């Protein structure tokens, strides 16, 4: 269906005992969407992920580095907060740039060490020239340059809620739920070439699956360690199958389709190099709450203080539902089966952990925010990060600013509000000085903050303030801080044939 002749560069690699890595990132998935996280409460829409959790480790206090797409992905690939790597909010269809070229990605470091590196799925870190995946460390790429609702297709109602098809013309269209653009056809890229525009989203899962299985099987034949990064957008705006479904079943159908792809990848990996391959599944942020019945489930992390005052408490926010994501690590013989870790960890920790497992060191010319979680994964260590900061990802305040800070069981909010909920309410933006502090051990729903006059509050505040100020000072004195260019230009939108108003080409066989 698509070209894979350039899947491997013409290089000679000697067999290596270094482990291979499969990183699977699910878009807009809720902590409660994984049945293993809420046994007995959720329909079994994730049987393959649940099996992987049973055979591996669930990380129950794992967080996306940000609460929207681009900043979360940038932090995962660089091990650095957005205030360091420069990516603090999403890139657009017409963005001329992307993740700053001064940043070094996990893929680049593994590629230099002899790994074969491939990516499948949603990139969303810049699609023009040097900013595309094959210029940021990936030998092979197949996927979409940004979200599935940021371009039209020929299939009306390709996602939920319905978006206008390309045949409707060139005007920009937004659905009542927001986010649907129809000015430029949604492209499918292979390496740096557009091979289909507008693409057929109904066929995308099978195309991704075929590519992933070829990459895994070819790596085995060559005896070469690999990094396979799969970024799935099934849950961003649910890609319901082309069958009549009532609204309540659309999200579940998309979740099952994503899970089936994960299962196929796991089966292929198990059949090739089972004992030497780490599969790490996680999410880029929490559910898109304003999508109502088309959004995921946050589980017990409801952000009740905020929802009782109006506004959203999931994606785009620093409430737990916005960044606590379902996470499973699977490595037979290395990661103990059927285990759970409550260690506080972040997607930024993937960067140093995979490098450590590969026996590699990150460049010494920059500062990092991720920690090596090897002992958590392999040796049952329950201690993770001392502090974790949560940046504003599009709600209240300035992009990238540290809105909330976690230390142990305590979490402080300095700014709240302004994220849209189902029904349209945003809640009033509020600055908190002194901050709201919640005890997540006894109040995971973030409903009742600690009494600011209590000794517990003061002890938590002192510890959190110390960690926050230390990080802000460190960033302020960091000479390796990057700045992203967020300039947009209509000509920067990917288009295989400018003569067609929605960009139209079909190069797939």
Image (tube, grey):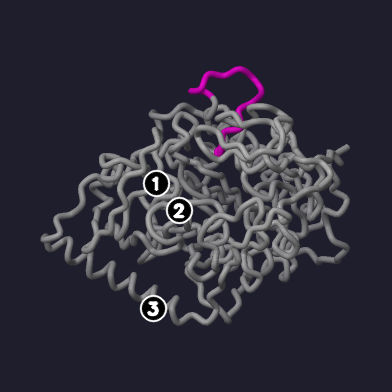
As displayed, is residue 362 above or below residue 383? below
Which tag, 3 or 1, sits closer to the chain's start?
A: 1
Q: What residue range appears in magenta?
A: 235-249
- The dominant secondary structure in magenta is loop
Total tally of numbered discs in the picture: 3
As displayed, is residue 145 above or below residue 105? above
Q: Counting other residues with Cα less than 10 Å from the Cα at mark 2, is it few (<14), some (14-19), or many (20 or more)?
A: many
Q: Badge 2 is on which residue? A: 394
Q: Is 247 inside the magenta-drawn segment?
A: yes
Picture coordinates of residue 258 (x, y %)? 60, 36
Q: Badge 1 is on which residue? A: 419
Distance in Å between CA atoms under marks 2 and 1: 8 Å
- Looking at the rendered image, the quarter that the C terminus falls into is top right
Which tag, 2 or 1, sits closer to the chain's start?
A: 2
Picture coordinates of residue 86 (x, y %)? 54, 67
Q: Badge 3 is on which residue? A: 473
Distance in Å between CA atoms under marks 2 and 3: 23 Å
Which tag, 2 or 3, sits closer to the chain's start?
A: 2
Residue at x 28% of width, y 51% of height: 440
In this view of the protein, which residue sits in the foreground, 199 or 380? Answer: 199
Q: For the residue labelled by badge 3, is the local secondary structure a helix, a strand or a loop?
A: helix
Name which quarter of the figure residue 97 lies in. bottom right
Q: Is 501 inside the magenta-drawn segment?
A: no
Q: For the residue labelled by badge 2, is the local secondary structure a helix, a strand or a loop?
A: loop
In this view of the protein, which residue sits in the foreground, 482 or 30? Answer: 482
As displayed, is residue 348 above or below residue 211? below
Residue at x 81% of width, y 47% of height: 498
In this view of the protein, which residue sits in the foreground, 390 or 11? Answer: 390
């Amino acid at each position: 269906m698509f070209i894979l002749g350039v899947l491997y560069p013409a290089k000679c690699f000697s067999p290596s005992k270094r482990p291979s890595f499969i990183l699977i990132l699910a878009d807009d998935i809720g902590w409660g969407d994984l049945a293993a996280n809420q046994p007995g409460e959720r329909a079994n829409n994730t049987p393959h992920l649940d099996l992987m959790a049973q055979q591996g480790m669930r990380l129950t206090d794992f967080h996306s580095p940000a609460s929207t797409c681009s900043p979360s992905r940038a932090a995962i690939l660089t091990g650095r907060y957005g205030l360091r790597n420069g990516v603090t909010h999403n890139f657009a269809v017409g963005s001329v740039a992307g993740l700053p070229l001064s940043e070094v990605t996990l893929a680049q470091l593994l590629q230099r060490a002899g790994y074969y590196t491939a990516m499948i799925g949603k990139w969303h870190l810049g699609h023009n020239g040097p900013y595309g995946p094959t210029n940021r460390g990936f030998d092979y790429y197949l996927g979409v340059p940004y979200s599935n609702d940021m371009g039209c297709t020929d299939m009306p109602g390709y996602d939920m809620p319905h978006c206008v098809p390309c045949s409707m013309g060139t005007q920009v269209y937004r659905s009542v739920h927001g986010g649907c653009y129809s000015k430029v056809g949604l492209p499918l890229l292979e390496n740096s070439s557009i091979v289909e525009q507008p693409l057929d989203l109904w066929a995308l899962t099978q195309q991704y699956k075929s590519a992933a299985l070829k990459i895994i099987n070819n790596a085995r034949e060559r005896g070469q360690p690999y990094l396979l990064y799969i970024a799935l957008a099934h849950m961003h705006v649910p890609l319901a199958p082309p069958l009549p479904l009532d609204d309540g079943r659309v999200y579940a159908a998309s979740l099952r389709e994503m899970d089936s792809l994960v299962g196929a990848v796991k089966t292929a990996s198990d059949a090739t190099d089972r004992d030497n391959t780490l599969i790490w599944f996680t999410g880029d942020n929490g559910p898109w709450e304003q999508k109502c019945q088309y959004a995921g489930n946050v589980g017990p992390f409801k952000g009740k203080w905020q929802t009782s005052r109006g506004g959203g408490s999931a994606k785009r926010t620093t409430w737990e539902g916005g960044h606590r994501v379902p996470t499973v690590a699977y490595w037979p013989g290395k990661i103990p089966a059927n285990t759970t870790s409550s260690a506080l960890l972040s997607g930024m920790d993937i960067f140093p952990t995979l490098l450590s497992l590969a026996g590699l060191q990150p460049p010494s010319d920059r500062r990092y925010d991720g920690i090596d979680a090897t002992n958590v994964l392999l040796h049952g260590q329950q201690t993770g990060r001392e502090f974790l900061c949560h940046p504003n990802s599009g709600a209240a305040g300035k992009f990238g600013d540290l809105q909330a800070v976690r230390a142990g069981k305590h979490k402080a909010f300095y700014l709240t509000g302004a994220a849209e909920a189902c029904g349209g309410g945003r809640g009033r933006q509020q600055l908190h000085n002194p901050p709201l502090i919640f005890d997540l051990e006894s109040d995971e729903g973030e409903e009742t903050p600690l009494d600011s006059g209590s000794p517990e509050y003061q002890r938590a505040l002192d510890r959190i303030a110390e960690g926050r100020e230390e990080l802000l000072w460190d960033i302020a004195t960091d000479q390796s801080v990057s700045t992203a260019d967020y300039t947009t230009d209509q000509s920067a939108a990917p288009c295989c044939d400018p003569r067609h108003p929605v960009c139209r080409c079909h190069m797939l066989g």
